[in-house]
Image (cartoon, rainbow, N blue to C red):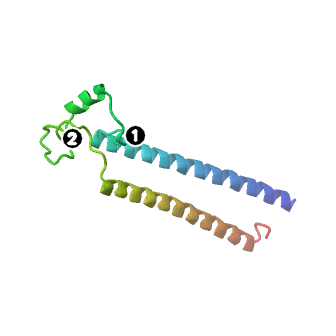
């Protein structure tokens, strides 16, 4: 009887943990999507652009008509002599990678804290006699 209760408790715990992971993964994906959208609205560069790939003439014409906010003028004039959106500099790439790593670390740290909390709760319940141990 007690063993079946323990199995049910573990199954419930597993389902809750899986749901927790799904929810936080979706939140992380949505946050990344929002960041991409914000960056695209600020820079005019969509994800995948700025990789050094050549653009079609249609894209060249569109880029020529857009102002580039990173050319230093900020007066809405020409967009860096018509060369289109700037490719991220090494410093910008480094910053993006550092932010990516920090977000990854924070996400892992958050999960580790949750696991520690859950373990402590299990140990507390075992000591209280509510779980077999």
Residue 95 visible to an observer of this rendering: yes
As drawn, the label of residue 68 is 2
- Quadrant of the frame with the C terminus: bottom right
Q: Which residue lies furthest to the bottom in this view?
A: 127
- Please determine whether, in this image, residue 72 is positioned above or below residue 110: above
User: Residue 16 or 81: which is nearer the viewer?
Assistant: 81
Q: Is residue 21 above or below residue 52?
A: below
Secondary structure type for disc 2: loop
Residue depicted at x 14% and y 45%: 74
User: Residue 2's image quarter?
Assistant: bottom right
Rendered residue at 30%/45% (across/down): 87
Q: Which of 52 and 69 is in front in this view?
A: 52
Q: Name the residue under label 1.
A: 48
Q: Which of 113 and 127 is in front in this view?
A: 113
- In the picture, measured across the screen, residue 116 lies left or right of residue 99, that is right
Residue 116 vs residue 102, the one in the foreground: 102
């Amino acid at each position: 009887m007690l063993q079946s209760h323990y199995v049910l408790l573990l199954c419930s715990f597993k389902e809750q943990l899986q749901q927790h992971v799904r929810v936080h993964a979706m939140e992380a994906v949505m946050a990344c999507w929002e960041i991409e959208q914000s960056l695209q609205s600020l820079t005019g560069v969509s994800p995948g652009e700025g990789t050094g790939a050549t653009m079609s003439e249609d894209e060249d014409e569109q880029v020529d008509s857009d102002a580039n906010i990173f050319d230093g003028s900020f007066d809405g004039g020409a967009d860096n002599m018509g060369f289109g959106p700037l490719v991220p500099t090494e410093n910008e790439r480094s910053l993006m990678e550092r932010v990516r790593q920090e977000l990854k670390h924070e996400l892992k740290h958050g999960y580790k804290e949750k696991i520690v909390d859950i373990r402590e709760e299990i140990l507390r319940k075992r000591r209280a006699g509510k779980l077999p141990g």
